[in-house]
Image (spheres, rainbow, N blue to C red):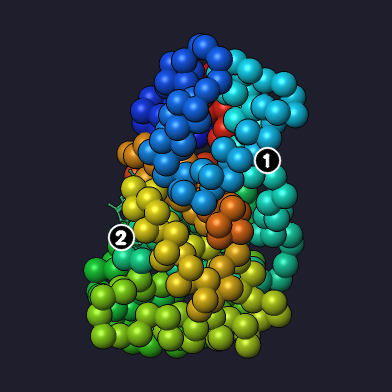
Amino acid sequence: MFRSIRDSLSRTRQSVFGQIVSVLGVGEINDETWEDLEALLIQADVGVPTTLALVDALRGRVTRDGLYRAEQLVQALKDELRAILVDAPTFELEEPRQLTIVMVVGVNGSGKTTTIGKLAHKYKGDGRNLILAAGDTFRAAAIDQLKIWSERAGVPLISGQPGSDPAAVTYDSIRAARARGFDMLIIDTAGRLHTKFNLMKELEKVYGVCKKSVHAAPHEVLLVLDAPTGQNALMQAQKFKESVNVTGIILTKLDGTAKGGMVFAIYRELSLPVRFIGTGEKIEDLAPFDADLFVDGLFDN
Ligand SMILES: Nc1nc2c(ncn2[C@@H]2O[C@H](COP(=O)(O)OP(=O)(O)O)[C@@H](O)[C@H]2O)c(=O)[nH]1
Ligand SMILES: [Mg+2]
């Protein structure tokens, strides 16, 4: 677990946080130190509001704690970064329930279907008796792709005809899950934002079917954001939040980008916890988010 988070942060570490000591220099803190720090954080996609808040907090600490050397800022920065990630709600999926329903949402290409394959593998390994639903009915290929992942994970799949109503597939999958005694259902959804069909309305319908059928369902609505999208992903997230009750984020493709700083913007600006991190394309490339490992992984030591 340590290795995969740390490995997937290598780009972010090499191009940003790992450089922080050399960029800030070793002299006394001056105006340039603050400018350099701001530029670094923005470069790592921490986002402007979160960057300004961080710099503000650090300036306060410099005064309060009497820090005067740039290298003392690094430890203070680590503390402030960690502070943003505390108070995350606990992972409710671990609670035993008769049937836990997880909806996975996000724009096309963000990594939903792949991540569902990884989640299926993980939860099966944890001893959950789970089933998948192919709620992205828009294209036959989307159904086939989930089928391949379900076979890889050794987890059954409920699917409908291409073009059929996702809400109907959801309804059928809940019925099947109950009839066959499954304790977890993960629903894939469509993510096309640029077509005539109304993605948000459709998601609301799927959400509504879950809500009506099972107490407190869907128990998790996981929004998949792809890290290379950077700050645009935050805007997408806002749209999804307005439509369905998103409970957490899965940040994918962290392995290929220096935008690891997004995690802080997700916590601070979206007020959502990161549940998992996608660390590659293979079935085991999914790491539960861990704040300490994450912050340590950003720096060289
Ligand atoms: N490197 C990397 N690629 C990923 C990760 N997650 C998904 N992908 C790739 O992203 C592409 C889109 O994934 P897909 O699951 O089809 O996205 P969907 O349209 O949201 O269902 C695929 O090529 C995946 O292999 C990840 O964590 N790391
Ligand atoms: Mg998909």
Q: Tag 2 or tag 1, which sits nearer the N-term?
A: 1
**Residue 277 image point, x, y percent:** 49, 45
Q: Is residue 248 above or below residue 187?
A: above
**Residue 48 image point, x, y percent:** 46, 49
Residue at coordinates 56% horizontally, 86% vertically from top-left? 208
Q: Tell me the amino acid under the disc marked 1.
A: Ala
Q: Is residue 35 left or right of residue 195?
A: right
Report the residue marked by disc 1: 83
Tell me if label 1 and label 2 are in contact, CB under 8 Å. Answer: no
Viewer-closest of 146 and 84? 84
Among the 4 quarters of the image, the one containing residue 139: bottom left
Q: CA distance from mark 1 to mark 2?
A: 32 Å
Q: Tell me the amino acid under the disc marked 2.
A: Gly
Q: Is residue 171 left or right of residue 112?
A: right
Residue at coordinates 64% horizontally, 69% vertically from top-left? 219
Does residue 269 appear in this view? yes
Q: Is residue 251 above or below residue 41?
A: below
The residue most toward the top is 26
Report the residue marked by disc 2: 109
CB at mark 2 closer than 8 A to ligand 1?
yes
**Residue 43 image point, x, y percent:** 38, 38
Does residue 119 appear in this view? no
Judged from the image, the secondary structure of the residue bearing numbered disc 2 is loop
Among the 4 quarters of the image, the one containing residue 7: top left
Viewer-closest of 263 and 33? 33
Judged from the image, the secondary structure of the residue bearing numbered disc 1 is helix
